[in-house]
Image (cartoon, rainbow, N blue to C red):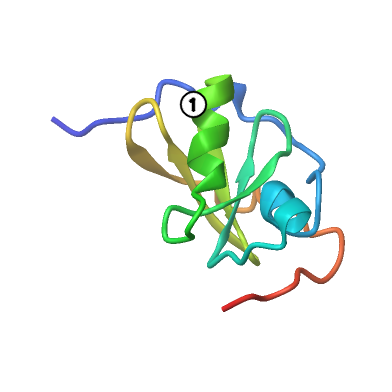
Amino acid sequence: MSKHCTHTAGIARVVPGRLGCEECLKTGDEWVHLRLCRTCGHVGCCDDSPNRHATKHFHATSHPIIEGYDPPEGWGWCFVDKVMLDLGSDTTPQNGPIPRYY
């Protein structure tokens, strides 16, 4: 039986909070890839990054869905259901150039 996301109705159009990982920009840390919270617009770093801020944001807020965001990649991930999502054309545009650290 294939697993599906039970949170897609909660995917919101959001405005990204920063042009990079919000916490890493504050501390001067580096990231690998960015993830955008599709509930509130928080921008955090991926789990391949040292600080894993997108996952930490999920644990702090229970916001279930992130979008691959550097550049927008057309996919999402539901932390709760542990399943990938095809966002199709429902991606969030970048507000400007995102600094690269890798």
Which quadrant of the structure image shows residue 27? bottom right
Q: Going 72% across and 62% down the picture, which residue do you hit?
A: 28
Compare residues 53 and 98 and report the one nearer the observer.
53
Q: Left or right: 42 with respect to 60?
A: right
Position above or below: 64 against 21: above
Residue furthest to the left in view is 1
Work out whether residue 13 or residue 28 is closer to the camera in this orientation and state it: 28
Quadrant where the C terminus is found in the figure: bottom right
- Picture quadrant of residue 83: top left
Q: Is residue 78 left or right of residue 31?
A: left
Is residue 22 left or right of 68 when viewed as pictured?
Answer: right
Q: Residue at x 63, y 38 (%)?
A: 37
In which quadrant of the rendered view does residue 33 lie?
A: bottom right
Find residue 31 and report its horizontal and vertical position in percent. 58, 64
Q: Amino acid at mark 1?
A: His
| Residue closer to the observer: 70 or 29 | 29
Q: Position of residue 3 (x, y in %)?
A: 24, 31
Q: Position of residue 47 (x, y in %)?
A: 43, 53
The image position of residue 75, as x and y in percent, is 50, 52
Q: Residue furthest front?
A: 27
Q: Secondary structure at mark 1?
A: helix
- The residue shown at (75%, 57%) is 25
18, 25: nearer the viewer: 25
Q: Is residue 57 visible?
A: yes
Label 1: few (<14), some (14–19) or many (≥20) C-alpha neighbours in 10 Å: few
* In the image, farthest residue toward the right: 96
State left or right for residue 56 relative to residue 92: left
In the rendered view, would you say 92 is above or below 58? Answer: below
Task: Report the residue marked by disc 1.
Answer: 59
**Residue at the spot 69% in from the left edge and 30% down from the top edge:** 12
Q: Quadrant of the N terminus?
A: top left
